[in-house]
Each structure stands twice: as C-alpha cells, then as structure tokens.
Image (cartoon, rainbow, N blue to C red):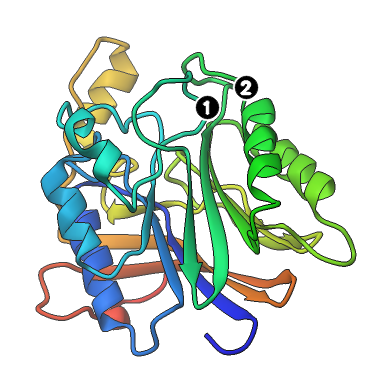
Amino acid sequence: MSGNTVKILFFGDITGRQGRTAVKSYVKSLEEKPDFIIANIENASHGFGLTKKNYEDLSSSGIDCFTSGNHIWDKKDIFEYIDSAEKLVRPINYPEGTKGEGCKVFEVNRHKIAVINALGRVFMPPIDSPWEVVARKIDEVKNNGIDSVFIDFHAEATAEKICFAKYLANKYNDSNSALIKAFVGTHTHVQTADEKVYNGMAYITDAGFCGADESVIGMEFSTSFKRLSTSIPERYEIAETPVACINGVEILIEGNFATHIKRINLLVDNSESEVNLEIGCK
C-alpha cells in the first residue's frame, strides 16, 4: 500500500476441498500481494460449515479475514473455537448473546477497516433485521477512527442486496467522503456482472464462489438433480472434479473513496503442481 491507497482482494464462497486448494494456490502464486485479503468460508468444510482444522489451514495461507453466512454453524466444533478465532466474522444479525462477532476491525498500514457480515431475510431463515442491526453497528464504530467499512451481505434475493447497498451508501457516504467503501453480496455461488462504484462504494450483487467448476454451485450434479427433480430429500455431495473456478473481486480504495472494482473469474487445475492460469478465464 502506498499513501492512502488500499487494495482489497475478496473471494466468493470457498466451497469444499477444491475451493480451498484453488484459493490457497492462487494466493501463493500472486506476484504482488494485495494489502488485505478477505474470503467467505461458510462452505469451506465439505460444502457445509467450517472446521477448526480448515480455519487454521486457510489462516496460514495469507488470508487476513473470513466472513461467513447461514451455514457457519453446520460443523459443531465451531462453537468451541469461534470466540477465539481472531480473523472470523459471523453474521451480525443473529440474536444478542450468539457466539462470535459480527464486526471486526483490522488495521492495514494505519488504515482501519471494519468488516461487517450480515444475513438477508428474503428466502432465508428467520433472523433479526439487517437494516437496523448493521446501521446501529456502523453508528457505533464510525466515531472510533474507522476509515472504511467493508460489508459482506449474505443473501438470496438480488433486490434485497441492491436496495440494502443503496440505503447504506446514501446514508453514510457523500461527496466529501465514503465510509462504506465496499458492499459485496454472497450466498448464491453465481457471480453477477454488475460490478460498479456507487457513491464512493464498490459494489457487486454476488461475488460468486470458489470450488469445483463441473458442479451445481459446488455440489455433485447427480445428487442435486435427484433432489431438485423429485423434491425428495437427498444429501448433497461435494463435487471433486480437478478443475476449479475462482470467483471474487479486487477493490481499490484511494483516499476517501473506493475508485475501482474488478471481477475475478478464473479456472485453475488443482491436479497441477502449480497454479496454471493459462487454462483461461470463464
């Protein structure tokens, strides 16, 4: 980072072993490291939840912060280590008293970034209102020397994501400065092509996912097909094909505003000893 410039790299939902392997290899291969790396990891352990082993493994790979979502509780050992997991942020709008933290502050070369994770409510399990909880937290931290707020909104409905992003950008950003520097959507595992800078805030409706490319959002086609075509409960199985996709965004903060957002949409072959980006962009 030079001066007041901060480069952030964000990875969409890391899904299973193939996603973990691809992201770790990609980070290792970067010739120029970003200033701050964030990844959503609610599906990192066999597609559902996050084990302590996988948390520690990803932590040692160079990722600075982890966001999550509604599947964060799927592995029971999460309750044993989430309070001591310094890099892990769980959705902020769970009821008061829930283990873990929904907002954490990270200092990147004297630039303080508050990372907030929140769940949507449309087509999602019942949860406290993100509109109220997130705004209350921003009001709480904005007078504590915070330079930027980064939000991962884990939600199903595109309309909810767009509306919530506009609400926050209009409430906290103006022509002089932007407190909300980034708002990224996660959860659908399908990357959208609507990246933009709105009122000083970098935005994308969904960053996509990192996992097996030949899959149904990271899961095996056969079990997904059986469940969706029959409506009979079927256990999803994680896809293990070697070619993985890496979805995410690069965000540039310059001074008081986010000025640039770029989508990442790559294919990598996990069977290769080194990351081979030559197999192409999707």
Which residue type carries mark 2? Ser
Nearer to the camera, 234 or 43? 43
Asked whether disc 2 touches disc 1, contact meaning CB atoms under 8 Å apart, the reply is yes
Q: Indicate which disc, 2 or 1, sits on the residue closer to the N terminus.
A: 1
Residue carrying label 1: 93
Which residue shows up at 34% across the image and 90% down it?
A: 31
Which mark is drawn over residue 129? 2
Tag 1, which secondary structure? loop
Query: Residue reaching furthest top?
Result: 232
Which mark is drawn over residue 164? none
Which residue type carries mark 1? Asn
* Residue 85 pos. (x, y %): 27, 46
Which residue shows up at 18% across the image and 44% down it?
A: 239
* Residue 171 pos. (x, y %): 82, 44
| Vertical arrangement, residue 55 with respect to residue 27, above or below | above
C-alpha separation, residue under disc 2 versus residue under disc 1: 7 Å
Horizontal relation, residue 142 to residue 213: left or right: right
Nearer to the camera, 38 or 115? 115
Which residue shows up at 55% across the image and 54% down it?
A: 114
| Vertical arrangement, residue 196 with respect to residue 211, above or below | below
Horizontal relation, residue 254 to residue 265: left or right: right
Which residue shows up at 16% across the image and 50% down it?
A: 54
| Vertical arrangement, residue 185 with respect to residue 39, above or below | above
Does the image show residue 282? no
Horizontal relation, residue 267 to residue 95: left or right: left
Tag 2, which secondary structure? loop
Q: Quadrant of the C terminus?
A: bottom left
Mark 1 nearby-residue class (10 Å; few <14, some 14–19, many ≥20): many
| Vertical arrangement, residue 179 with respect to residue 129, above or below | below
Nearer to the camera, 102 or 43? 102
- To which quarter of the image does residue 100 belong? top left
